[in-house]
Amino acid sequence: MNDDNFTFSHPLRVRWGECDAQGIVFNVNYFLYFDVAMTEWMRALGFDAGNQVDFFTVHAEADYRAPAKFDDMLEVKARCVRLGTKSMTIRTAIYRSDELLAEGLLTYVYSTGGAGETAPLPPAFVERVLAYEKTPPERKSM
């Protein structure tokens, strides 16, 4: 059953190059799908990912439930589940119709760009996230 806690969803069709010889999505490509979800989620917030705000991944995990296959039409979903002082955690999920195929949890740290120096999340960014998400993210220092 699709999770109603997600505000954001993006359609994605599985391409042949993302599959192994059996036509099943190779496991590492789910992280590419999570990255698409993050980029499009940022765009939905009104930010050009990597231009107006810059994040780098410090943790990524995935749980696989069922395989996606060549030419499947998927929905990749994303929502912010935690906002820290300098970081945020995004929960992602990939569905084919109502079937949950994979879930991800990714932690991103905000950077001022360049050398990867961390910085506090900009207040305007935090405000947009809080206004956008229908399920408010946890607020923690980190």
Image (spheres, helix red, strand yellow):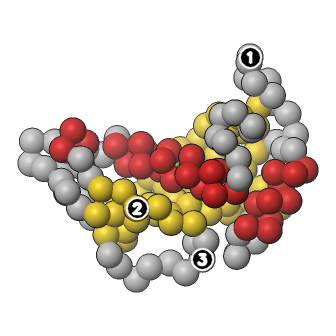
Amino acid type at mark 2: Pro
Query: Image point 34% across, 63% down: which residue?
Result: 74
SS label for mark 3? loop
Say above or below: 58 vs 43: above
Amino acid type at mark 3: Asn
Percent across and percent down for residue 35 are 50, 45
User: Relative to residue 14, is residue 100 drawn left or right?
Assistant: right
Tell me where residue 68 sits by quadrant.
bottom left
Who is closer to the viewer here, 135 or 15?
A: 15
What is the CA distance from the residue labelled 1 to the residue labelled 3?
35 Å
Any mark on residue 88, and which? none
What is the CA distance from the residue labelled 2 to the residue labelled 3?
17 Å
Report which residue position mark 3 lands on.
Answer: 5
Residues at circles 1 and 2 in contact by the CB criterion of under 8 Å: no
Report which residue position mark 2 lands on.
Answer: 11
Which image quarter holds the N terminus?
Answer: bottom left
Say above or below: 72 vs 54: below
SS label for mark 2? strand
**Which sits earlier in the primary sequence, circle 1 or circle 3?**
3
Percent across and percent down for residue 85 are 86, 47
Q: Is residue 141 visible?
A: no
Percent across and percent down for residue 100 are 37, 71
Percent across and percent down for residue 39 are 57, 46
**Which sits earlier in the primary sequence, circle 1 or circle 2?**
2
Amino acid type at mark 1: Ala
Report which residue position mark 1 lands on.
Answer: 115
Say above or below: 22 vs 94: above
